[in-house]
Image: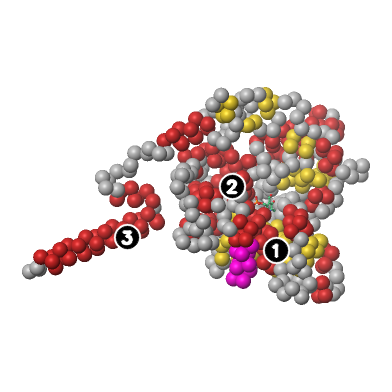
Amino acid sequence: MLGGESKERAIHSSKLLYLLLITSISLNLYSSSSSLLLFLLPFGSAPEPWWTNPTSIEAEAVAAVRCSGHGRAYVDGIYVGGVPVCECNTCYGSADCSELSPDCPADADSGDPMFLEPYWMREAASSAVVLAGWHRMSYRMNNDAAAISAELVKQIRRLHSAVGNAITDGRFILFGAGSTQLLNAAVHALSPDDPSSPPANVLASVPYYPVYEMGTTFFNDRENRWGGTTSTWANKSDSSAAGEFIEFVTSPNNPDGHLKQPVLNVSSVITDHAYFWPHFTEIPAPGDEDLMVFTLSKLSGHAGSRFGWALVKDKKVYDKMSKYIQLSMFSVSRDTQLRALKLIKVIVEGSKVGGKDIFEFGYSTMNDRWRRLNDVVSKSNRFSLQSLSPQFCTYFQTIRDPSPAYAWLKCEREEDKDCEAALKAEGIISRRGATYNTDDRYTRLSLIKTQDDFEQLLQHMVALVSKESGPQVI
Ligand SMILES: Cc1ncc(COP(=O)(O)O)c(C=O)c1O
């Protein structure tokens, strides 16, 4: 028999044990599925939402504003008389975006990945994020100053494994404000530490994404400099005195959509896999490079959220990149990480599930645009497009037709030395070849903008090609 005091102690310790057990079960269940936690609530039912109600009512009211399918109202947009104003797509105007401006040029310039907006409209319920006023206010996260969400890291690894486009085992994962920041961090990290070493030469192969050169030149670090194109160095018999080399490889390439490999046999390569997703390219095998950079912008289309990640093999390079991120902005916004987590979870859970797979949606949209543009250009003697062929894709487990993010258009006529200007004269805004450090006979047409942008581009191209031998051509 237990005495009074020891009985009390025994009751107290069993209560404590019970509490610990419940806490541990709750935590375990929460980490695997937060919805299961609801079953552990005192009365066995989910609480009635109360603090999310005003926010969700406001969000749904704004989403319901009619913009004729040619625009969108936003919660943080402009309000007139308490009503959010429609922000219209290019060439559309009036209060409800219903009026198409007749002589508006087709704008195929920027790489704004709005083609995925309809997918997220469909997935409105699964992709919405509620952000409490007290959500992760601290500089730190899980008491970690690097403030990287472990759950987001886990989902990114799941994503790559589901898509089969990158090996994440044995890699450190680092977040940045878009891949732009990580590309700059990578150049810094791969440059020599020794102040007596000559600066590293940063290179890319033509045609290349211009921000590599612009970033390297603008930041003007002592330990690196823009070294030009790989072809300049490939032909030099002795380049050892020039110092180290850092080669940017963009695969698939912006602007021409080809999968690329390093050209020079150098130790430092930054592989920019911004477009290495089944929307834009076949996935022949998982990326296995030492330093790979990815971005949410071209995966989910959320360019405005500014989120990218790097997979880094070498600890020293990872540490230097981390320091760069820390000193430039401390860490990636917790709000952005939460949104990225939600979106990536939707993508992973929807992958290969009938109708929910973002890659099915992205691929069929991009392939449709490429096919339609090809049909028009194939009837022209004045223009041609880059040649891309059907290839086996390990994600779709089939041979797929091309679906590049950009059309790399060439003006074939002798007199059309400036292809961008030739298109502009006909009401098409494109991005000239010189931007990619190549011939102005080429110009880039973006295929990843809104459906409205694409339809306008196609209409203008039809009109332009029809002029070659009269309207009956198309
Ligand atoms: C090849 C390439 N890399 C990186 C980026 C930048 O992406 P982010 O939005 O992540 O900064 C772009 C954007 O167009 C791109 O085309």
Q: Quadrant of the N terminus?
A: bottom left
Main SS type for the magenta part? helix
Lateral position of residue 417 relative to residue 345, left or right: right
Lateral position of residue 152 relative to residue 271, left or right: left
Q: Amino acid at mark 2?
A: Ser
Q: Earlier in the sequence, mark 3 or mark 1?
A: 3
Q: Quadrant of the C terminus?
A: top right
Q: Earlier in the sequence, mark 2 or mark 1?
A: 1
Q: Which residue is at 57% across, 57% downward?
A: 331
In this figure, which residue is indicated by the disc labeled 2? 305
Q: Which residue is at 82% across, 67% downward?
A: 233
Q: Residues within 10 Å of mark 1 (few under 14, many from 20)?
A: many
Lateral position of residue 416 relative to residue 436, left or right: right
Image position, residue 407 (x, y; %): 74, 45
Q: Amino acid at mark 3?
A: Ser
Q: Which residue is at 58% across, 29% downward?
A: 79
Q: CA distance from mark 2 to mark 3?
A: 35 Å
Q: Which mark is residue 408?
A: none
Q: Which of the two residues, 474 or 161, is positioned nearer the viewer here?
A: 161
Is residue 322 part of the magenta span, yes or no?
yes
Q: Could you tell me if residue 61 is visible in this image?
A: yes
Image position, residue 372 (x, y; %): 70, 38
Q: CA distance from mark 2 to mark 1?
A: 23 Å
Secondary structure of residue under mark 2:
helix
Which range of residues does the magenta coloring cover?
314-324
In this figure, which residue is indicated by the disc labeled 1? 187
In this figure, which residue is indicated by the disc labeled 3? 24
